[in-house]
Image (cartoon, grey):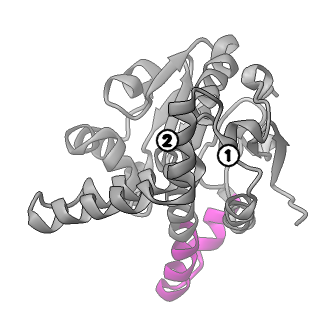
Amino acid sequence: MDYRTIEIQMGNGVAVLWLSRPEVRNAFDETMIMELTAAFGELEADAAVRAVVLAGKGKAFCAGADLNWMKRMAGFGEEENRKDAMALATMLHRLHTLKKPTVARVHGAAYAGGIGLLAACDIAVVANDAEFCVSEVKLGLSPATISPYVLAAMGERAARRYFLSAERFSAAEAYRIGLAQEIAPFDELDATVNQILGEIVQGGPAAQAAAKELIRTVARARLDPALIADTAARIAAIRVSEEGQEGIRAFLEKRPSAWMRQFKPSPKKRAKKS
């Protein structure tokens, strides 16, 4: 598929998906939302892709919603707005439930929906000069569609402050509250991302998909006999799977697993700075 607002670079088992509207700091509109949704499906279906990096061209990761798009939405009725919001909500959910590991490479501004994008990823690596803002209330709006992912990342207490104040906060604060898992100087951002990718590609693809689904289930479940039985059934099923059997054999035989022999990862030069 040809894309107008994003670019995808492939190599060594990693797909780097660039938000590519640098002239508007990668602010998204209906076209970018549609293209991101399609791209996530495309990358999930590609067996050669082991991990996805989400990054932004130019000076920012993503400044939130495009102003022209917001103007168009302001003229919509409630039903039209609901359909429009569902497209964004669906895109974020598609990213969140992608079966492959996802890493957000964040620099510059990550505002509003931009924070939603990074929070929907499994891992967020941010440059130490990145800046964040959940800005919706200052526009008389609420961060509704991004809230499931941002709340899960930063926690309720931090969300109460930043959802209500809409104040800007630093990369160090994003790291402190758990929105980001790694922080690095901008010139070391790619190296930090690449180090994590080097670890990710050593895992079994099916096992990673199962682990992601496990997290989504267990994180919100009550610890009761049903959950205990469910987790036991999950590990039993994956132990007897083709990938599980191969992984155990490779470990016992002290050799690379089949998924590691499929390519020679060299993550040191994955995502290039724009």
Which mark is on residue 50? 1
Left or right position of 228 against 166: left
In the rendering, at what x and y percent does residue 103 appear? 58, 39
Look at the image and tell me in which quarter the N terminus lies: bottom right
* Total marks in image: 2
Secondary-structure class at tag 2: helix
User: Magenta span covers which residues?
Assistant: 68-88
Residue type (three-letter) at the residue carrying disc 2:
Ile
Residue drawn at (66%, 12%), measured in percent from left and top? 188
Nearer to the camera, 195 or 242: 242
Look at the image and tell me in which quarter the C terminus lies: top right
Which mark is on residue 248? 2
Residue drawn at (65%, 44%), measured in percent from left and top? 51
Nearer to the camera, 123 or 18: 123
**Mark with earlier residue (1, 2):** 1
Q: Residues within 10 Å of mark 2 (few under 14, many from 20)?
A: few
Determine whether label 1 and label 2 are within 8 Å by CB: no
Magenta-colored segment: predominant secondary structure: helix
